[in-house]
Amino acid sequence: MAMTATPQGVPGTPAAVPSEPSVPKRRNTELTLLGFALVLGMFAYANVSEALLGKMPSNFAFVGVVFAAALLSCHLMIRKFAPYADPLLFPLAAMINGLGLVIIYRLDLYSRANALANHDKVPSAYAPTQAAYTIVGLAVMIGIMLLIRDHRILQQYAYISAFVGLILIALPAVLPASMSEVNGARSWILIGGASIQPSEFAKLLLVSFFAAYLHAKRDALTLASRRFLGIYLPRGRDMGPLLVCWAVAMVILIRETDLGVSLMFFGAFVIMLYIATERTSWLIFGLLMFVGGASAVTLIAPHVMVRVTAWLHPFSDVTNTTRQIAQSLYAYANGGLFGTGLGQGYSGLVGFAANADFILDTVGEELGLVGLTALFLAYGLFVSRGLKTSLLVRDPYGKLLAAGLAVIFALQVFITAGGVMRLIPLTGLPMPFLAYGGSALVANWILVALLLRISDTARRPIPPALPFTPDFAAPQSFPLNPAPSPQANQVNP
């Protein structure tokens, strides 16, 4: 029987439907990296226990199974509901979180041994609480991904996000000091034995608002008035948003004496403004305004003045006001290139907040410059994947949102590390995923969820275009001068 070819382009003939572009999902890569993060964390856990107790932890197998199950469950949910998400974001966060748990456990052992040696009351362990916060954070991450199937829905609630975010930031300032002040900074909500740092959640809401606002006002903010010293200056009428954010940052600094939150809030807005407009003048104006305002506040806020003095003269009062920053510098010096080894340092001498604001000291002393560099590379890789997501996503709001989330994460790392390393005055922000604190940990897992959702949208292939069918096409074979039909020459009677 002879084969006949189907004519192409004939009306009524079904056209071939283009296949969906092949884009690798790379979920197996994510699973492999999660296995590496788990093995690294469990190895560090065993290493600390062997160094300080001379034996393996009694709950080693139980901890390994619990966290393996938690990571695997999250991976399966990502595989199903965000199959094209970036494969590095979740493993990087899990690895840093695991290292933080090990270091907090190591500092718990130091505090316990120190209390027993001095016949004091043995303090509570922080590592189990932080482990519980980790499980809660992972659950919240999956919940956010299931709740928000499209990040663009957040754009509809931009002004609500701004309103709620500002309330969360301002709430500690209006509460009594007994319900909001910790170590001189009024940035907490203390209820009974629990504490919440609302600014950690406010930063996410404000970044969402900044992204929506800058997307809507980008054209106006891009316009320049005149050129001065090679820089295009913004128009005076467009300085309003920058002045408002500067005023809010200064109020936070004055009322709550929280330099870290103030710098993170204002810095995120200025950098996102630069990303949206590509005007260097916004960066220069923002930097000058914040430095000038913070310098003025230093003269009227004793708590801020103490921190600035400790920054400028870290060894002037090592038994009192500058003891922590001096001990922090000693820890880095003692660590050297390769560190003293896990469990064999003296970073616990920092005292208060050794497992929170100063937890980076333990990394620098016990893992050395090599370990500290590896940690910063992990943070840098996390930020770079967030910025790459910003470049890949197609909608302008998503671009600014992903960039803002990556920027605010990078700012928190820089502000915290710069404070304990005496690059800038100490601010009191927790190191993301590493330091003790439930509010910061859960908020950062929400940040991961948002980046995963945006990256899934960014890497997802574009749906194929509708197939071309000749039925809807204009006729292609009509002659330019058609011959008249015989009926055309007939005359009706």
Image: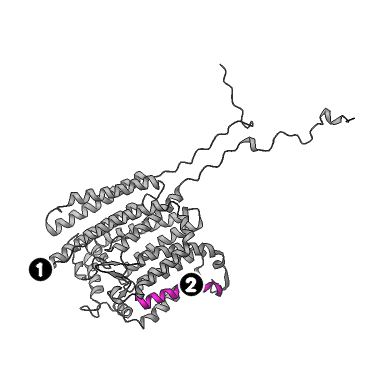
Query: Magenta: predominant secondary structure element?
Result: helix
Residue at x-position 44% and y-position 60%: 403
What segment is highlighted magenta in the picture? 231-257
243 in the magenta segment: yes
Residue 159, image x, y percentages = 47, 65
Q: Nearer the viewer, residue 314 or 202?
A: 202
Q: Is residue 340 visible?
A: no
Residue at x-position 26% and y-position 73%: 325
Q: Nearer the viewer, residue 288 or 13?
A: 13
* Mark carried by residue 242: 2
Residue at x-position 46% and y-position 58%: 154
421 in the magenta segment: no
- The mark that comes first in sequence, 2 or 1, is 1
Q: Is residue 236 visible?
A: yes
Q: Which residue is mark 1?
A: 117
Question: Label 1 amino acid?
Answer: Ala
SS at mark 2?
helix
